[in-house]
Image (tube, coloured by chain):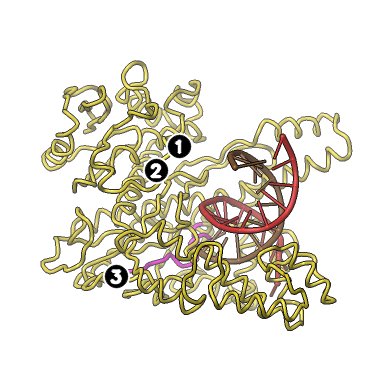
Chain colours: A yellow, B brown, C red
Amino acid sequence: MYIVLSEAGTDRASLSTLNDDGSAAAGPEYIPRARLAERVAQLEATAAPRWVWGDTATAYPPLLAVGVRVERCHDLRLSRAILRASSLTVETALARESASVWDAAPPLGGPAVSATAASAALFDLDDSPAPHAPGGDDDPPAELRRQLEAVRTSADPNRLRLLLAAESAGALIASEMSHAGLPWREDLHDELLTELLGARVGAGLRPELLERLAEQIRAETGAAQLNPDSPAEVLRALRGAGLTVVTTRSWELKQLDHPAIAPLLEYKKLSRLLSANGWSWMESWVTDGRFSPEYVPGGVVSGRWATRGGGALQLPKQVRRAVTADDGWMLVVADAAQLEPRILAGISGDTAMAAAGRGTDLYAGIVAGGAVSTRAEAKVAMLGAMYGATTGESGRLLPRLARTYPTALAYVETAARAGERGEVVTSRLGRSSPRPSDEWAELQARATEGAASDAELARARQQARDWGRFTRNFVVQASAADWALCWMADLRRALAAFSPAAAAPGRAAAPFGRQPHLVFFLHDEVIVHTPAAYAEEVAAALCSSAAAATRLLFGAFPLEIPLDVSIVSSYADAD
DNA sequence: GAGTCCGCTCGG
DNA sequence: TATACCGAGCGGACTC
């Protein structure tokens, strides 16, 4: 059963009940905004519907803010994006219709919605245009029916149903993780910064240890006025000191033998820490002991998530000490080891590669299979296969990999050739790559028609190869994203089944105050914050959810996707 | 002064 | 020890 939740005027919401085939069952029921959360909670307990709304990031945070959690949803905007692009739906009416208000970008969330701001804001569209047209042709129930019809008439309804459910569950998880926040000890973060950089100073000034390094660099290069933050000045100073350098990249500097290099490298590292995750970062993004980035499900074409604000995709190892569980709680950190090559074995059906990863580190298995002689070689060759390397060590090792695992290598080759022709490729569950731009297609057309100059021909070949590398990687990355969504969706369900811990002295926000819950996700890694007594059970749940995801994607194919799991107080101690 | 691009470094 | 895929974000350098 579906219940479609949409706005009905400024201070009311409507609830329409639909049957699984999309036909109307009841409603609409109109609810004053002030009583909506209560009504949702009631229906959730009695009817357990799949909630349908235009945009989870708009609709769900206000519910969470008053402690209401829902089990399932269908996010119309995210689902539509998948269905409109999927190669499995090309023949459907939804894919053929012209763009509508449902294709518009969601409203920008700005900073992650805080509990206090959100509780007053359900459907509050006073100063921004409605993201979706209420009523009329584009009312949400009608859009849901179009989508259900597209799935029903698609080339593979089951795969798409799974993908849409996983994508929508991901949207719920994203809102819940932003709401819960990643436990963050500001005092430990401050200690760490002070130790590495010196005491905090005002904006625009250099902390003491950083300034000391700057002085050292000036002394060693003889450039008394040098500002080490300016790459151009650094380049000039190094050349003045008799060094031959083209850029100020760390790897290039590391080649050089000069007393200015060590302090310069150290300066760059610490300066990066200060600007990216220093005190002002902490003030902007950590509140009351929680780091709450805004996750953007579907933000990357491959189905990976993006984030807005806080740089949650790049939390440096340097600061992970600050990620610390509440008293009486633990962090369960899990990542899927060598996820992408294992996914490649699965989507290609390469039994030899799948066997190489069973019961062992996949790269070790590849060495054991005789394709290459060291783990490092196995890794660089596999990455090269998935990214489309042509030169260097990786390019040289590829033929050896191809002899041992022809099925897997042929799969990514086929995807690359399709991309070079401008065709679409598709993930395991049905997410398709975007088409190349019109300019791309025009240049290819000119090249094949013989109307292009030599320079244009060269550019056309380059563009084709570039797009081929993209589609080659897409099939792997997007299928890995499918898997990760299924993993998390199953895990979320499992965590919700834990009964609230009797003694949970932490201060996790409702509705997660006494239950294990997800607090972080990054491509192939998750962190669960849990009452300590549940930590072992949570670790087991993580593994069984991973196995469930592998079965959902690959059925009986003998593929293993094992997890590295750590139960720790601090993220820094994981692995 | 605002907007944009680029170089660099962080993450997977 | 780059290469090759996907990102975020900062600060400098540049343009208007």
**Disc 3: which residue:** A325
Vertical side of B5 occupied by A194: above or below:
below
**CB-based contact (under 8 Å), mark 2 and mark 3:** no
Query: Real-space Cα distance between discs 2 and 3?
Result: 32 Å
In this view, which residue lies farthest toward the top? A136
The quarter of the rendered structure image containing the N terminus of chain A is top left
| Residue A257 place in picture, x, y as percent | 76, 82
Q: Are marks 1 and 2 on the same chain?
A: yes
Q: Magenta residues, as a range? A: A331-343
Label 3 secondary element = loop
Foreground tag (2 vs 3): 3
Chain letter of the residue beneath label 1 in the structure image:
A
Give the label, 1 or 2, closer to the camera: 1
Disc with the residue nearer the chain's start (1 vs 2)? 1
Q: Amino acid at mark 1?
A: Ile
Query: To which residue does mark 2 refer?
Result: A163
Q: Which residue is mark 1?
A: A82
Label 2's element?
Answer: helix
